[in-house]
Amino acid sequence: MEYEDAVEPGSSCDHRTQWQTLKTPASDWVQPVKAWQLLRQRWRPPPIADAASDAAETAAVVAARTRLPAQVSKAALAAKLLSLSGVFAVHKPKGPTSAELLNRLKEKLLAEAGMPSPEWHKRQKQTLKIGHGGTLDSAAQGVLVVGIGRGTKMLTSLLSGSKRYIATGELGKATDTLDSTGKVTDEKPYDKITREDIEGVLQKFTGNIMQVPPLYSALKKDGQRLSTLMKKGEVVEARPARLVTVYSISLLRFQPPLFTLDVECGGGFYIRSLVNDIGKELSSCANVLELTRTKQGPFTLEEHALPEDRWTIDDITQALQHCPSLLPEESASKKPKSEKSSDQVLSYEYITLSETKREEDAIKTL
């Protein structure tokens, strides 16, 4: 028996373009069909889960190989950061306090070394000592000397030397902070003051003089800064006058009501008090409008102060290498040694920061 067309021409099942009339005996094609069905039952595509697993494993191996050099590099930077020891200078802009700037510096160094790690606080901790010497007011800018590692112990003796400032004063106004950030407390005429008058007064402020520190200052009473107590509205008595030294002072410009001074002085000297006292000597009043520290110890603003874009481990390392040539012979001969603890070679996750003690960081109330 032969199989003829089972589809009527013109019907909805007429697929003559794909299927031709079957005229093959059943015994000739039934077996191949069964073989094809058996083959389909035995063949299975590879499991999707296994393929995904293989892909994930491959990706993990590639990522691990990529991360390894970065981890080694960060660990090396962390070890280098811990080994830094000495004194260098940074440029402090207007705005932040000296303490805020120091925190910003520490954060940048930590970030460069890849710290802190998510697990850093769970492991053995080490300490990176860092401090500054010679507080600059938030409204002031210029050289800020920083000690790192054992260099924090050098700040007290090193920074007792001279400092140099460019200060612009404003005649006719007195403020409670003795600078432009404070509230005006008095106003007096200044129109009759001449350049010669100012130059004549400056001679009285040269050499060893007695000076009363400002009420708004970093000096402390009962463990709190006078400026903090003043901001709280507490009554603060003026500190007694103390002996300070002015090595040189000159008038650079005079454009009433503004006058600009170049002052080189010793430790413990306040430019704000100087400008305030000059105003009184001129039978008027005055406050500091702008203040820039151009020199601190052997460090100058132009040659040594690192701007923020150079607050890197490598730049600070180079600055520390030049430090011995800047220091007096006595200080240079006591060059601090790098920390050589066996713990220092540990992974960067182990490193943490802590504020240095008062006697170590030598944050001066100048």
Image (cartoon, rainbow, N blue to C red):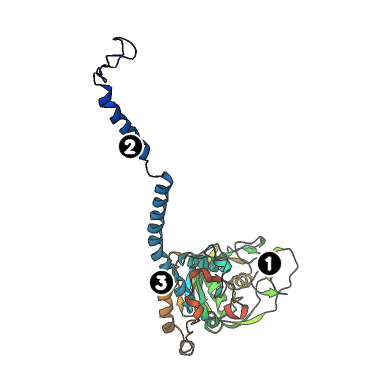
Residue to which mark 2 is pinned: 39
Q: Is residue 153 above or below residue 48?
A: below
Q: Which residue is mark 3?
A: 314
Point out residue 104 in the picture as x, y percentages from the top left corner: 53, 65
Amino acid at pointer 3: Asp
Residue 18 position, x and y percent, is: 26, 20
Circle on res. 365: none
Q: Residues within 10 Å of mark 2 (few under 14, many from 20)?
A: few
SS state under label 2 = helix
Instruction: Evaluate whether residue 11 shows in this view.
Output: yes
| Contact between labelled residues 1 and 3, with CB atoms less than 8 Å apart | no
Residue at (28, 22) in percent of width and height: 26
Q: Secondary structure at mark 3?
A: helix
Mark 2–mark 1 distance (CA, rounded to whole Å): 88 Å
Do residues under tags 3 and 2 come within 8 Å of each other at their CB atoms?
Answer: no
Check the picture and name the quadrant holding the C terminus: bottom right
Q: Residues within 10 Å of mark 1 (few under 14, many from 20)?
A: some
Q: Amino acid at mark 1?
A: Thr
Distance from the alpha carbon under mark 3 to that under mark 1: 37 Å
Report the residue marked by disc 1.
Answer: 228
Q: Amino acid at mark 2?
A: Leu
